[in-house]
């Protein structure tokens, strides 16, 4: 077990955003957090990253309270990729990806050692951003920016990768390419991935397990085939879809009925 969230709650003003959530995540597992807008998905991910402080409960990372980790030590374990694309910066793509090595910085100079440069090079090759290394963010498309964001996160060499709606601004081709890359990285590096997603079909194709949230409460959690059921989707989203089994992957795929004639 690499992450254990015990009865965690988060309150904004008088609103309970997370209500006594329990989560167990094993190493090398891909877990997707699903639910309608305002259900607390991004808040939960931010709490698991240690970016947002919980009001009650406890979050343990590798058996240690998340708030007991020093910043650099936590960054060696957790990388957090938000849904917002990287902003325009006066740095080159290579310089931005190099920032991912900051948690591993020592007192030695120069701070980027040969091993660091090898990791940066590997992350750019893996994410197919190596050809962009001398360009600036203002010169990149949305898909290219997101791949640079992923290269930056992977350069941290995290044990846990947190993704908040990472394909929001990507078309279908880049969504699949993005998740294919992540799945390949996960298999090769034994990385634990937790993603917040809106697309139930993508979650079903790539995740091992899913969590369903609604109004800050955990509706259900388990393997994809157990969770993406008609009753669960109806209870969580208030819709009654058609659920079919993917002909190749044998996992649930959601079809929307639309307005009845």
Image (cartoon, helix red, strand yellow):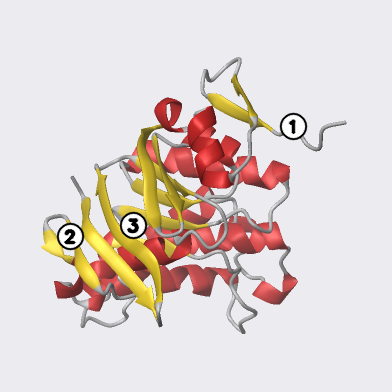
* Closer mark to the observer between disc 2 and disc 3: 2
Element carrying mark 1: loop
Q: CA distance from mark 3 to mark 1?
A: 42 Å
218 over 225 or under it: above or below: below
Q: Residue at x 38, y 70 (%)?
A: 16
Q: In this rendered view, identify the residue nearer to me: 26 or 87.
A: 26
Looking at the image, is mark 2 or mark 3 earlier in the sequence? Answer: 2
Q: Determine which quarter of the picture holds residue 245.
A: top right
Residue 114 seen from this side: no
Taking depth in this image into account, of 126 and 207 the one nearest to the observer is: 207
Q: Which residue is mark 2?
A: 60
Residue positioned 53% across, 50% down in the render: 197
Q: Is residue 201 above or below residue 166?
A: above
Q: Position of residue 161 (x, y in %)?
A: 38, 55
Horizontal and vertical percent position of residue 33: 44, 49
Q: Secondary structure at mark 2?
A: strand
Q: Which mark is residue 157?
A: 3
Q: Which residue is mark 1?
A: 257
Labels 2 and 3 touching (C-beta < 8 A): no
Q: Residue at x 67, y 47 (%)?
A: 174
Q: Quadrant of residue 156?
A: bottom left
From the top left corner, tell me how far across and down residue 116 is, in percent.
34, 65
Q: Is residue 88 left or right of residue 118?
A: right
Kindly report the distance in space between the C-alpha atoms of the residues bearing marks 1 and 2: 41 Å
Dot 3 lies on which element? loop
Which of disc 2 and disc 1 is earlier in sequence?
2
Graded by Cα atoms within 10 Å as few (under 14), some (14 to 19) or many (20 or more), the crowding at tag 3 reads many
Residue under the image location 27 percent in, 75 percent down: 105
Q: Quadrant of the C terminus?
A: top right
**Foreground mark, 3 or 1?**
1
Q: Which quadrant, please, contains the N terminus? A: top left
* Residue 238 can be seen in this image: yes
């Amino acid at each position: 077990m690499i992450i254990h969230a015990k009865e965690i709650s988060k309150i904004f003003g008088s609103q309970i955003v997370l209500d006594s959530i329990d989560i167990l995540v094993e190493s090398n597992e891909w877990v997707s957090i699903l639910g309608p807008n305002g259900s607390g998905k991004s808040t939960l991910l931010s709490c698991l990253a240690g970016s947002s402080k919980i009001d009650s409960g406890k979050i343990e990372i590798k058996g240690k309270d998340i708030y007991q980790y020093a910043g650099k030590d936590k960054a060696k374990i957790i990388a957090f990729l938000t849904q917002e694309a990287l902003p325009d910066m006066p740095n080159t793509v290579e310089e931005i990806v190099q920032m991912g090595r900051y948690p591993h910085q020592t007192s030695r100079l120069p701070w980027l050692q040969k091993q660091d440069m090898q990791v940066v090079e590997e992350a750019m090759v893996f994410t197919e951003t190596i050809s962009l290394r001398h360009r600036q963010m203002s010169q990149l498309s949305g898909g290219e920016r997101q791949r640079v964001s992923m290269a930056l996160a992977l350069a941290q060499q995290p044990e846990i990768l947190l993704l908040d709606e990472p394909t929001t601004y990507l078309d279908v081709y880049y969504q699949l390419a993005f998740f294919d890359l992540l799945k390949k990285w996960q298999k090769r590096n034994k990385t634990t991935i937790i993603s917040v997603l809106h697309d139930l079909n993508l979650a079903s194709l790539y995740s091992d397990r899913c969590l369903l949230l609604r109004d800050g409460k955990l509706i259900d959690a388990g393997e994809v085939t157990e969770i993406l059921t008609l009753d669960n989707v109806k209870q969580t989203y208030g819709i009654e879809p058609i659920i079919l089994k993917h002909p190749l992957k044998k996992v649930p795929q959601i079809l929307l009925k639309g307005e009845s004639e």
